[in-house]
């Protein structure tokens, strides 16, 4: 199982990251399968970072094998969606960026890919018009709508599959809107698609 993630896919987040460059293609990175955190299990704050941040994202699940998928057929290759957290060690990421080094230690560490319960596409309808949000300790800290994505889910699938064979069960984090911030011990994270709670876990 592979975990893909798209960076800088919402203009509002790019602004807060002071990211000025315009990429003509999705910015893609990966996390290992050991990054997966699911079933409401707690996230343990790692000791190598002073600034672990949440990035709330829609996550789609690949449902069939595919390579070089045309954008117009991409919708056939995913069937479920949930809210996930792309945990990011922001201090490490900043350092790696400054040095021009890869991001893996800041983005792919254990438990850095939290996912909620998956909903089927039939249950929720149009995937490019979904409201989603994260509440921490009962307060909404981040919200977005998938229509704000710079690269649509179909476009992302087409792009990824030029380079990587997609397999059933692969996950794709589709990018975060504005409002990222730190998590702290004892925080209670709850993620929603529209008004349905799909993600619920604590930081320890
Ligand atoms: Mg992200």
Image (cartoon, helix red, strand yellow):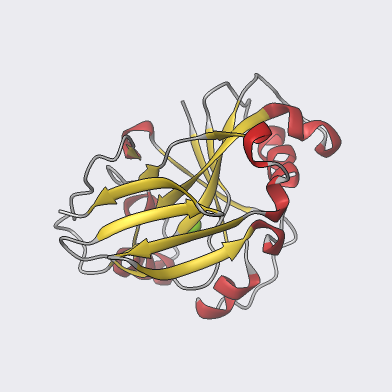
Judge whether 14 appears above or below 58 on screen.
below
> Is residue 71 shown above or below 77?
below
Residue 165 is at least partly visible in this image: yes
Residue 91 % position (x, y): 30, 69
Q: In the depicted view, which residue is nearer to us: 70 or 176?
A: 176
Q: Position of residue 123 (x, y in %)?
A: 63, 35
Q: Which residue ends up furthest to the right in the rendered image?
A: 72
Q: Which image quadrant for residue 137?
A: bottom left
Q: Residue at coordinates 71% horizontally, 25% vertically from top-left?
A: 67
Q: Position of residue 4 (x, y in %)?
A: 52, 41
Residue under the image location 85 percent in, 36 percent down? 72
| Residue at image point 26% right, 69% down | 51
What is the x, y in percent for residue 11? Answer: 64, 72
In percent of the image, x 21 and y 55: which residue is there?
A: 203
Total tally of numbered discs in the picture: 0
Q: Nearer the viewer, residue 37 or 108?
A: 37
Q: Is residue 50 left or right of residue 108?
A: left
Does residue 54 appear anywhere in the picture?
no
């Amino acid at each position: 199982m592979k975990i893909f993630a798209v960076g800088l896919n919402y203009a509002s987040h790019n602004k807060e990251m002071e990211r000025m460059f315009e990429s003509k293609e999705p910015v893609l990175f990966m996390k290992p399968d050991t990054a997966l955190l699911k079933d409401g299990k707690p996230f343990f704050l790692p000791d190598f970072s002073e600034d672990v941040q949440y990035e709330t994202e829609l996550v789609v699940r690949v449902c069939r094998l595919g390579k070089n998928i045309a954008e117009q057929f991409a919708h056939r290759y995913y069937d479920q969606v949930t809210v996930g957290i792309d945990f990011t060690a922001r201090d490490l990421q900043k350092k790696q960026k400054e040095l021009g080094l890869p991001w893996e230690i800041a983005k792919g560490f254990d438990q850095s890919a939290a996912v909620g319960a998956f909903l089927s596409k039939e249950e929720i309808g149009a995937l490019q018009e979904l409201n989603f949000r994260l509440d921490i300790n009962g307060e909404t800290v981040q919200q977005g709508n998938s229509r704000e994505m710079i690269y649509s889910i179909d476009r992302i699938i087409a792009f990824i599959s030029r380079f990587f064979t997609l397999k059933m069960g692969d996950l794709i984090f589709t990018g975060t809107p504005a409002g990222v911030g730190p998590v702290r011990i004892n925080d209670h994270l709850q993620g929603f698609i529209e008004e349905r709670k799909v993600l619920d876990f604590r930081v320890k």
